[in-house]
Amino acid sequence: MKRDDLLERMDAIGRSVAKHEGTLMLLALGSIGLEMDRLDDYSDLDFFLIVEDGHKARFIDNLDWLAVEPLAYQFQNTKDGHKVMYEDGIYAEFAVFEIVEMPGIAYTPGRVVWQRDEALDTFATPKLVTRPSDAAHRYEEALTNLYVGLLRERRGEQLAGFELIQVAAVNNVLIAYGETSDPFNPTRRVEGTHPELVARLQEWLPGYGKSVEAAAAILRHIEAHHSVNPALKQEIVRLLET
């Protein structure tokens, strides 16, 4: 999908919500929001619709405001919103929030596509900002991921071991390493922001059935950047060698 098509669709949704009673703001997020330098042919639409208190259900239950072009697919993935695809292939994920909910919602600053009143500008910037834990905390989390993951692996629960070692531990290591370009997903844009990690990712993510090898490689990386408790390391190494 072309960049200009995505921008036009976002604007069209803005024109649509402006016609409905109870709507207050359409806030574009991510690459369709303030990070449009990342917007490309592989992007999608990510946005919040902010409405008056008491109007949320109307805009979740009835997507007429969103149907600026025919919808081919829709799926309510949370109590707050849907994932949808238009017939022309444009994909979108959105949530609807009332004013009373906004102080408790964590999100990155967004771009105002449309708003009922300039006094609503405050909602473009979240009051609740997710901040990554310090590196030491994340490395310790990763070490416990490795330990418990290896326990699962040795029990024969290879899928559970895979999830802890090649998903949870890797995510924690990425955050500890300093990957914060997306506060909600540390795997986003790693290849572009940290190309030096690509070779290591191939060692950390060898695939299902190879979590022992992955754990050994991740442990080596952690040891190079963080002081590892000797007792915990001894148990991890024991499981690696079992």
Image (tube, grey):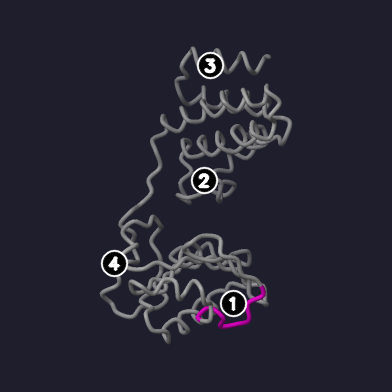
Q: Which residue is mark 1?
A: 5
Residue 71 part of the magenta segment: yes
Q: Residue at x 48, y 43 (%)?
A: 179
Q: Secondary structure at mark 4?
A: helix
Q: Are marks 1 and 4 in contact (CB under 8 Å)?
A: no
Choose top left, top right, bottom left or bottom right for residue 148: top right
Q: Secondary structure at mark 2?
A: loop
Going from N to C along the chain, the mark reached first, 1 or 4, is 1
User: Where residue 57 sits: x, y (%)?
Assistant: 44, 71
Residue farthest toward the bottom in the current orientation of the protein: 19
- Measured in 3D between alpha carbons, the distance from the residue under mark 3 to the one under mark 1, in whole angstroms, is 52 Å
Residue 16 part of the magenta segment: no
Going from N to C along the chain, the mark reached first, 4 or 3, is 4
> Which amino acid is tagged 4?
Thr
Q: Are marks 1 and 2 in contact (CB under 8 Å)?
A: no
- Magenta range is 65-72
User: Where residue 194 sits: x, y (%)?
Assistant: 54, 43
User: Where residue 74 sits: x, y (%)?
Assistant: 61, 70
Q: Which residue is mark 2?
A: 186
- Measured in 3D between alpha carbons, the distance from the residue under mark 1 to the one under mark 2, in whole angstroms, is 28 Å
Q: Nearer the viewer, residue 187 or 225?
A: 187
Image vertical order of residue 82 relative to residue 7, above or below: above
> Which amino acid is tagged 1?
Asp
Count residues near mark 2 (Cα–Cα under 10 Å), then give few for <14, some for 14-19, many for 20+: many
Image vertical order of residue 181 relative to residue 21, above or below: above
Q: Which residue is mark 3?
A: 233
Q: Residue at x 60, y 69 (%)?
A: 84
Q: Are marks 4 and 2 in contact (CB under 8 Å)?
A: no
In the rendered image, the quadrant that contains the C terminus is: top right
In the rendered image, the quadrant that contains the N terminus is: bottom right
Q: Which residue is mark 4?
A: 122
